[in-house]
Image: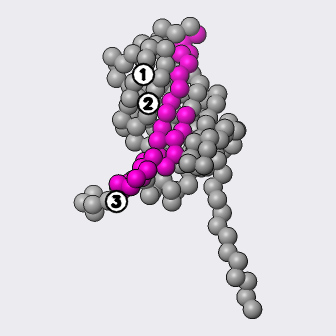
Amino acid sequence: MGDSQSWTAVPSAAERARSVLAAAWSCAVTAEGGREEFVGAHTVAEDGRVLLHVPEDSTLLAAAICAPRGEPSAVLEFADVAPVPVRSRIRARLWMAGWFVHEDGHLAFRATRVVLRPPSGAVVVDLDEFSAAAPDTARSASSHSPSTGTD
């Protein structure tokens, strides 16, 4: 008789959070200057920092330049959206609280708190684990539309 039990490794909260961040096409930023939505304007550094490339006329950029110590506080919001139409398309939300630093022509976001909210409930993600985690590539790939093959 063989062993009939099977198990699947479940990604940690930090890995799921990094997966949402890697798969997100857009982000909403709430800061002192108001709320702005950006599409295709962010990248993610190896350590989990969000690098935001904003237009020169952005109120967020103005807030970063004019803020005391040059570090405006903000909250970033990302969503993991299912690639196909289903009843609940938002599979998870990710909120990051922290501040922006203007560096090399873009805004680098330094998180002080990371919260992941999957359907099962909100989870505060440890910052060191978040920085060290890698996104779940299978989950990130499933968030994007399939390629048309016309590269």
Farthest residue toward the left? 150
Label 2 to label 1, Cα distance in Å?
A: 7 Å
Q: Residue at x 33, y 16 (%)?
A: 57
For badge 2, the amino acid type reads Ala
Q: Which residue is mark 3?
A: 146
Residue 35, disc: 1
Q: Residue at x 56, y 47 (%)?
A: 118
At mark 2, the secondary structure is strand
Q: Which residues are magenta?
A: 69-95
Q: Quadrant of residue 2?
A: bottom right
Q: Residue at x 35, y 54 (%)?
A: 85
At mark 1, the secondary structure is strand
- Please indicate, yes or no, whether residue 105 appears anywhere in the rendered image: no
For badge 1, the amino acid type reads Arg
| Whole-percent x, y for residue 55 in the image | 34, 23
| Whole-percent x, y for residue 100 in the image | 53, 22
Label 2 to label 3, Cα distance in Å?
A: 25 Å
**Of pointers 2 and 3, the one earlier in the residue sequence:** 2
Q: Which residue is mark 2?
A: 28
134 relative to 151 in the view: left or right: right
